[in-house]
Image (cartoon, rainbow, N blue to C red):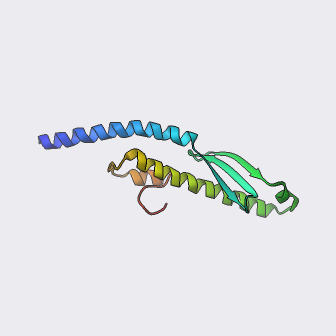
Amino acid sequence: MFKGLGQLASLMKQAQQLQGRMKDMQEILRKLKVEGTAGGGMVTVEMNGQQQLLACRIEESLFASHDRELVEDLVVAAVNQAMEKVRQTTAEEMSKITGGMDVPGLSNALSEMGLGGTDGQGS
């Protein structure tokens, strides 16, 4: 019985440590900035670690082409690339923060939030 209490205390301590680390993680994600590009750099977007789009730059020559569909496709591709970079970076940072802690369900929870898990499936 006392062995079970010791394990519970250890689990509670890990949970408290993880909670503090998660606050650090939120700050890291808030400050993180990634870029996604498409069309050989003709479209560039900037996104933060909270998956908020911060900027979108489109080369003037794309507008001159009057190819609206091309511009739309390139913007989507650039945003998707930036989101994938955020997912990868988030997974890497989570791995650092959890420091090898075995937290049941963490990978699934991250995947459900769209942040990719550390399950090795490459989200």
Res. 114 in view? no
Q: Is residue 83 above or below residue 19?
A: below
Q: Is residue 94 left or right of 10 when viewed as pictured?
A: right
Res. 25 in view? yes
User: How far across and down, in percent of the image, does residue 54 sit?
Assistant: 67, 44
User: How far across and down, in percent of the image, does residue 115 sit?
Assistant: 50, 52
Tell me the residue at 81%/61% (across/down). 68
Q: Is residue 36 above or below residue 48?
A: below
Quarter holding the N terminus is top left
Q: Is residue 114 above or below residue 27?
A: below
Q: Quadrant of residue 63?
A: bottom right
Q: Is residue 13 left or right of 120 when viewed as pictured?
A: left
- Of the pair 34 and 73, the residue shown nearer to us: 34
Tell me the residue at 73%/62% (across/down). 40
Tell me the residue at 33%/40% (across/down). 15
User: How far across and down, in percent of the image, does residue 17 sit?
Assistant: 35, 38
Q: Is residue 109 left or right of 81 when viewed as pictured?
A: left
- Of the pair 113 and 29, the residue shown nearer to us: 29
